[in-house]
Amino acid sequence: MISIDILDLRSFMQELLKGTLFHTFEVRTVEIQTFTTFQISGQLHKDFFSLDEQEILNREYANWQEIQPFIFQIVKGSRLPKKLKIVLSLPKNKWNKFLSPEQENQTSALFINFLYEDQKMICTTGVGLSSFSLDKTIEHLWDDYIQSFLKQNQIFSEKNF
């Protein structure tokens, strides 16, 4: 797990709330504090969908693309929220970009967390493993992937030590 400061808050928030960069990430939870607290679970309620739609979905969580417009509606305006916490995860079909099949089997989730508070945005990474392990290889691979992802997409950031 690493902690990263997002340096250009304005352009990052523009990308997060209006851009497409995070569209394919799964939404685990969102918490927004403005005049009240809004909490959103990204878990899909499959019984809401028709049987045909359920077969097509084949996933447990909403994508950021589906939730993003609602978040934008809550935070838009002249005031920034007091707090914004977003927990996303990389869909399993993208893990093979940097994990071996064996490592994929050991992994239950790859998280990227964004916390805006006190006029700062901090990004942290996290890994859910299927079973306890002292081996940090998967964690380091995910950390490296996120740092590279941010850099490739010109999200200026600085790793905290």
Image (cartoon, rainbow, N blue to C red):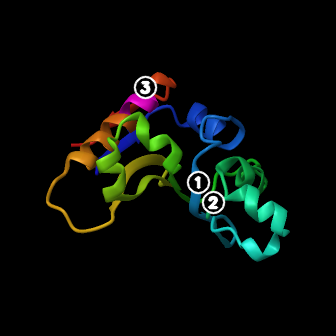
Q: Image quarter for residue 99?
A: top left
Q: CA distance from mark 3 to mark 2?
A: 29 Å
Q: Which residue in the protein does label 1 denote?
A: 26
Type of amino acid at the residue the image marks with label 1:
Glu
Amino acid on which disc 3 is placed:
Lys
Residue 154 drawn above or below residue 76: above
- Residue flagged by tag 2: what amino acid is it? Arg
> Which residue is at the front of the view, 32 or 25?
25
Asked if the residues shown at circle 2 and circle 1 are in contact, with their CB atoms under 8 angstroms apart, the answer is yes
Q: What residue is rendered at 38% in x and 50% in y?
A: 124
What is the spatial separation of the Cα atoms under label 1 and label 3, in whole angstroms? 21 Å
The span shown in magenta is 147-151
Can residue 133 be seen by looking at this rendering?
A: yes
In the rendered structure, are the residues bearing label 3 and label 2 in contact, judged by CB atoms less than 8 Å apart?
A: no
Residue drawn at point x = 22 percent, y = 68 percent: 132
Residue under the image location 60 percent in, 41 percent down: 22
> Principal SS element in the magenta part?
helix
| Image point (43%, 54%), residue name | 111
Q: Which residue is mark 2?
A: 59
Residue 119 on image: x %, y %:
50, 48
Give the mark nearer the N terminus: 2 vs 1.
1
For the residue labelled by badge 1, is the local secondary structure a helix, a strand or a loop?
A: strand
Can the viewer see residue 90 in this picture?
A: no
Q: Which mark is residue 151?
A: 3
19 within the magenta span: no
Q: Is residue 51 above or below residue 1?
A: below
Q: Is residue 52 left or right of residue 143?
A: right
